[in-house]
Amino acid sequence: MDGLKALAIISKGTRRQKRGISLLSIGREIQSLYSIHKSLPKVASIVKISPEMVREFLKVVTLEKEVQQLVETGKIESVDMCYRLSKLKGKEQVSLAEAIVGQGLQSKDVRAIIRYKLDHPEMEMDAVIDRVIQSKNREVYVAYFVLEDDVMKKVNKTARNAQARLELVKAIFDEVIPKKLIIFLGLSKKVVTVKAEKEAVPMLRKEAKRLKVPLPKLANALVRNYLKE
């Protein structure tokens, strides 16, 4: 494979443009450059793409052999998908890659599936894929709850790291909404994000009414109630 040709193509190309070469071949060429320069910005300046794109291409060569074959043959042509797949290992990565090819999944589907899997590590990958794809055809409710300073202090005191804080918030909401209805639940700084099926809405409203708080204040009331002395 002509390395210069690969680099010339990715210098000119965009994600939507046909490169005439597999992502795996490009990834190998970039890996070769990175092994010399040891710098994402330096390699990015050479091939004229962003450091983040360099990072994504480097992940292509770390994929499982079965997945690399799908990339090599052009069945997977999105570097973003390859980057997302690299977050999984072994059979889970292979299962999702095969679903991408077999079910025609899009990048946004892959992102949602991986996010859900990381959020529900106990679930089998096939079940996660089915769950996320089915949810696409359902009405989804998204709510953002801002934790007040005193509440966040209680959370930080109880849970010392980000993962522990997230698990705490999950445990609190699990008492209000069945896990099967929760598509995504996250905690970023002081913001709790809840993405759930529409059936969860009346449950949240009922709990807010029970605690005598408006719905936007529900997370604060739940945390205070859960961590009360």
Image (cartoon, rainbow, N blue to C red):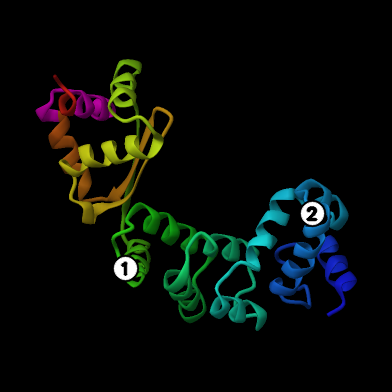
Query: Gap in Å between the C-alphas at discs 1 and 2?
Result: 36 Å
Q: Which mark is residue 35?
A: none
> Could you say which disc has been placed on residue 49 in the image?
2
Q: Residue at x 88, y 73 (%)?
A: 5
Residue 44's x, y, as percent? 80, 52
* Place of residue 167 in the rendered image (x, y in percent of width and height, measured from the top left): 29, 41
- Find residue 225 and report its image quarter: top left
For discs 1 and 2, the disc positioned in front in the rendered view: 1
Residue in the image at 36% along x and 68% along y: 125
Q: Main secondary structure of the magenta part?
A: helix
Residue 141 versus residue 229 in the image, above or below: below
Task: Tell which of 75 and 69 is nearer to you.
Answer: 69
Marking on residue 124: 1
Q: Residues within 10 Å of mark 1 (few under 14, many from 20)?
A: few
Instruction: Write down the quadrant of residue 57 in the picture.
Output: bottom right
Q: Earlier in the sequence, mark 1 or mark 2?
A: 2
Where does residue 14 sit, x and y in percent of width and height?
Answer: 76, 62
| Amino acid at dot 1 | Glu
**Is 4 situated left or right of 137 in this image?**
right
At label 2, the amino acid type is Ile
* Quadrant (top left, top right, bottom left, bottom right) of the N terminus: bottom right
Residue 111 located within the stretch drawn in magenta: no
For this orientation, the residue located farthest to the left is 210
Query: Residues in magenta?
Result: 209-224
